Structure formats: structure tokens, C-alpha cells
Image (spheres, rainbow, N blue to C red):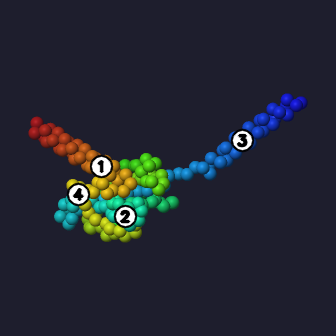
């Protein structure tokens, strides 16, 4: 009888212990913050490329950055990026495309955030609002690499690599199409 009591006690204790571990897990779970940005290519009235939009952050972390912000609960990422661009740089986006996701937990020292980066076009000059102290167009050759906040230097480098690959692939396709036409 004593043996049965000890076995029942041990089994009960194990069940309680595992329940407590399971019960504490949801409390410890902290999901990353979902954010979104847009690399906005600005074109003039003649449809000539002028550069991309950067902001000077109006609050910490200081520095220059790709405009963006947090996705609100119940909002799609696409709606969030359009809203954020209107709030932060007062630009309507055209040809919006999802570009890449950045999720390194160290990309923002304040918290773990996951950024969904986009590429879009705009046909007017930016105007600073919301968290931006300043909004401006920068030529690709003049990107202030050492002044960029977060991991935005990596994001812009990936963008430039993608643009180069995309342009090269289009040139190869054009060349191959011309070769086929000539034959």
C-alpha cells in the first residue's frame, strides 16, 4: 500500500510539474514586432529616375533610414506600408512590390523586429512627417552608408544587388531576343 501511495504521489507531482511548465510557456512567449519599409524610387515628370527617399529620424535611434514603421493589429502589411509612407513622407506609392524580409533579432537594439521591405515608385518629392525630422531624395552614388540606422545599409545593398541582377537579366533577355529575331 505504501508503494502505491508513493507511486501515485510521484505521478501526481510529475503531472503538476509538467502542467506548471506548460502553463508558464505562453506567458514567456514574446513575438517579434512586425514592421515594414519601402525603398521609394522617385521619378520626375519626364519619368527620369532622381534617386531614392531617405529620412533623418526625428527620435532615437538617430540617423538616416529607409522610411517605414510598425504594422498595426488587424492591418495587412501592404496597407501598413502605404499608410506609413503617407504619414512619414507624404508619398503615394505606385508599383508596390514586396522585396525581402529581414528578421535578425539584433537588427534593432530596442527589440526584436521583423521588417518586410518593399520597393515602390513615386512621382513627387517627399515631405517629412510623423517620426521623420527630414525627408529627402538621395542619388544612388550619394547614399550615406555610414549614417544609416538599423540594418538599412544591408537592405540598400541587397536592393542595389537586386537592381543590378534584374538589369543584367533584362539585358541578357533582350540580347537573346534580338539574336533570335536576326536569325
Residue at 41%, 60% in the rendered image: 61
Query: Under tag 3, what secondary structure?
Result: helix
Q: Tell me if I can see residue 54 in this picture.
A: yes
Q: Name the spot of residue 8 as percent of width and height, x first.
A: 81, 35
Q: Give left or right: position of 36 versus 25.
A: left
For label 2, count other residues whose C-alpha is less than 10 Å away and answer few (under 14), some (14-19) or many (20+). many
Between the C-alphas of marks 1 and 3, the distance is: 50 Å
Q: Quadrant of the C terminus?
A: top left
Say which mark, if any, is on residue 17: 3
Q: Which tag, 4 or 3, sits closer to the chain's start?
A: 3
Q: Determine the secondary structure under disc 4.
A: helix
Q: Relative to residue 114, is residue 39 drawn left or right?
A: left
Please tell me which of labels 4 and 1 falls first in the chain: 4
Lower position in the chain sequence, tag 1 or tag 3: 3
Q: Residues within 10 Å of mark 3 (few under 14, many from 20)?
A: few
Instruction: Please name the residue shown 26% across and 56% down the image.
Output: 143
Which residue in the protein does label 1 denote? 157
The local secondary structure at tag 2 comes to: strand
Residue 41 visible here: no
Front position among marks 2 and 1: 2
User: Along the horizontal axis of the image, is 65 left or right of 21?
Assistant: left
Residue 95 place in picture, x, y as percent: 31, 57
Label ID, residue 57: 2
Alpha-carbon span between mark 4 and mark 3 = 60 Å
Relative vertical location of residue 22 with respect to residue 70 in this rendering, above or below: above
Question: Residue at coordinates 58% horizontally, 49% vertically from top-left?
Answer: 29
Whether label 4 touches label 1, CB < 8 Å: no
CB-based contact (under 8 Å), mark 1 and mark 3: no
Amino acid at each position: 500500500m505504501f508503494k502505491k501511495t508513493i507511486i501515485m504521489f510521484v505521478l501526481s507531482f510529475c503531472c503538476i510539474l509538467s502542467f506548471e511548465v506548460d502553463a508558464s510557456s505562453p506567458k514567456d512567449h514574446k513575438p517579434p514586432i512586425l514592421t515594414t519599409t519601402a525603398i521609394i524610387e522617385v521619378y520626375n515628370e519626364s519619368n527620369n529616375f532622381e534617386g531614392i527617399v531617405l529620412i533623418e529620424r526625428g527620435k532615437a535611434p538617430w540617423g538616416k533610414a529607409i522610411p517605414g514603421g510598425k504594422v498595426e493589429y488587424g492591418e495587412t502589411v501592404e496597407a501598413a506600408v502605404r499608410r506609413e509612407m503617407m504619414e512619414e513622407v507624404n508619398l503615394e506609392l505606385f508599383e508596390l512590390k514586396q522585396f525581402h524580409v529581414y528578421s535578425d533579432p539584433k537588427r534593432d537594439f530596442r527589440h526584436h523586429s521583423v521588417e518586410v521591405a518593399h520597393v515602390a515608385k513615386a512621382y513627387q518629392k517627399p515631405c517629412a512627417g510623423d517620426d521623420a525630422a527630414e525627408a529627402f531624395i538621395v542619388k544612388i552614388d550619394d547614399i550615406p552608408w555610414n549614417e544609416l540606422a538599423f540594418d538599412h545599409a544591408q537592405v540598400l545593398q541587397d536592393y542595389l544587388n537586386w537592381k543590378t541582377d534584374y538589369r543584367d537579366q533584362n539585358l541578357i533577355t533582350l540580347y537573346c531576343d534580338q539574336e533570335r529575331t536576326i536569325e
